[in-house]
Amino acid sequence: MGIYSEHHRFREAGEQANVNNVAQFGEPVRSLFTTTKVFTLHHRISIVDENEQVVYEANTKFPSLHDKTDITDASGAQVAHIERKFFSLHERHFITMADGTSFQLSNEFFHIIKDITNIEGLGWQLRGNILGLNFQLYDADGGIIAVIGQKLLSLHDKYCVDIYRPEAEPVVVAILVTLQHMIKDRAARASSSSSSSSSGN
């Protein structure tokens, strides 16, 4: 049974594509699904296909000020490297693909509920809805590349991504992993701010 919500477009592996995604963009060429596992010294995201076979893995070593993350494919080959750097009040994530392509994402994206951010270096746009937990990735001409959905109230930080441009899959996976880190960072900052406010009262 597929997910029918207009706003929450997450689905599990094996379920039908979200009907709203299909109505708006057609059937995806491929879909991938993530689950985050946190260990003492590593933060690991496994990305699986419809059959729950691991296609990619992202590993982050802790403690790491720059949140350095490496993405590898099922054979262990390098796909991308991600680093977080701070500029003034904002943080940026720099992504370098195995073929040398590089681009960046900024947390300025999260200042308001719904916004559009340019992915510097690609000419792509990420259009998001934090409350709806879904995001659309478009190319420079406004063509759909992928739709990302996050599971509501999940202990394992689950995401799904419907991919419409299969040649862009490695870059989409790198953006998906980066977005997952950025949302987690945002939640941590919000929790820290809330705790500070509570302790100050």
Image: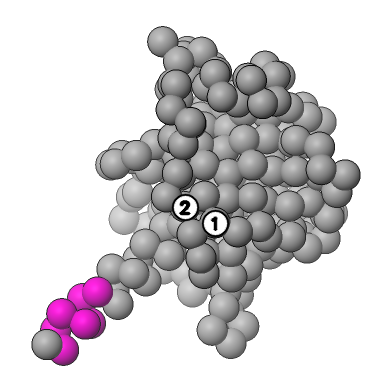
Residue 170 on image: x %, y %: 72, 38
**In percent of the image, x 78 and y 51: which residue is there?**
124
Q: Is residue 21 above or below residue 109?
A: above
Q: Is residue 2 left or right of residue 93?
A: left
Neighbour class for label 2 at 10 Å: few (<14), some, many (≥20)?
A: some
Numbered disc in front, either 1 or 2? 1
Q: Amino acid at mark 1?
A: Lys
**In percent of the image, x 70 and y 25: which residue is there?**
25
Q: Is residue 95 left or right of residue 61?
A: right
Principal secondary structure, stretch drawn in magenta: helix
Neighbour class for label 1 at 10 Å: few (<14), some, many (≥20)?
A: some
Residue, disc 2: 130
Residue 175 on image: x %, y %: 64, 48
Quarter of the image that includes the N terminus: top left
Residue, disc 1: 114
Q: Tell me which segment is drawn in magenta.
A: 194-200
Quarter of the image that includes the C terminus: bottom left
